[in-house]
Image (spheres, rainbow, N blue to C red):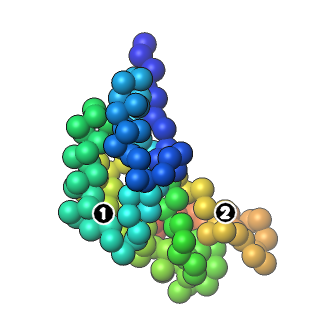
Amino acid sequence: MSLKLAISNIAWPADIRHEVYGFLSRNGVTGVEVAPTKIAPWDDLNKAVLTAERDLMATFGLTVSSYQALYFGLPGLALLEDEPAFEALLKHTVRVARMAEQLSQGGGGVFGAPRNRLRGRLSEAEAFELGAERFAKLAKAVR
């Protein structure tokens, strides 16, 4: 059995990624967990930028293993708050899914954003119920 190893791009400054990709490749790493804003700011993450990053990683035999920091630097997005905050989160999640399609034909996203999943005044049961409902909407939206 071979070990697949991936490292997050939050581990190095973006301006040295060429050197890091080479180092990873030479040392048996095959995947990169991508925080999109380590490639470029949200507003600059267009098809050309994503294609260039995908091609650069491929040059070193690397692929995207997963995505993280999906909501980094974007206040007002929330899973369990009011409907406008959830709709903003939903819209952005679809945007990230489209980026993932361009960068790696999809892939798993890590929903680890603590501030985006605070339950506020909801009880644990209410938060669980609302979260399940909203995660179902997220899943349908990104298919």
> What type is the residue that disc 2 sits on?
Pro
Q: Which mark is drawn over residue 119? A: none
Residue 30 percent location from the top left of the image: 37, 31
Quarter where residue 128 is shown? bottom right
**Image point (30%, 63%), residue name:** 98
Residue 62 percent location from the top left of the image: 32, 36
Contact? badges 1 and 2 (CB < 8 Å): no
**On screen, 13 above or below 1?**
below
> What type is the residue that disc 1 sits on?
Arg
- Is residue 69 at least partly visible in the picture? yes
Label whose residue precedes the other's in the sequence (1 or 2): 1
Q: Along the line of sight, which residue is nearer the eye, 62 or 21?
A: 21
**Mark 2 Cα shell of 10 Å, populated few (<14), some (14-19), many (≥20):** few
Per the image, the residue denoted by label 1 is 98
Quarter where residue 141 is shown? bottom left
Could you say whether the residue bearing mark 2 is in a helix, strand or loop? helix
Q: Is residue 109 left or right of residue 54?
A: right
Q: Is residue 58 left or right of residue 20?
A: left
Per the image, the residue denoted by label 2 is 114
Check the picture and name the quadrant holding the N terminus: top left
Could you say whether the residue bearing mark 1 is in a helix, strand or loop? helix
**On screen, 69 above or below 127?**
above
Residue 33 percent location from the top left of the image: 45, 45
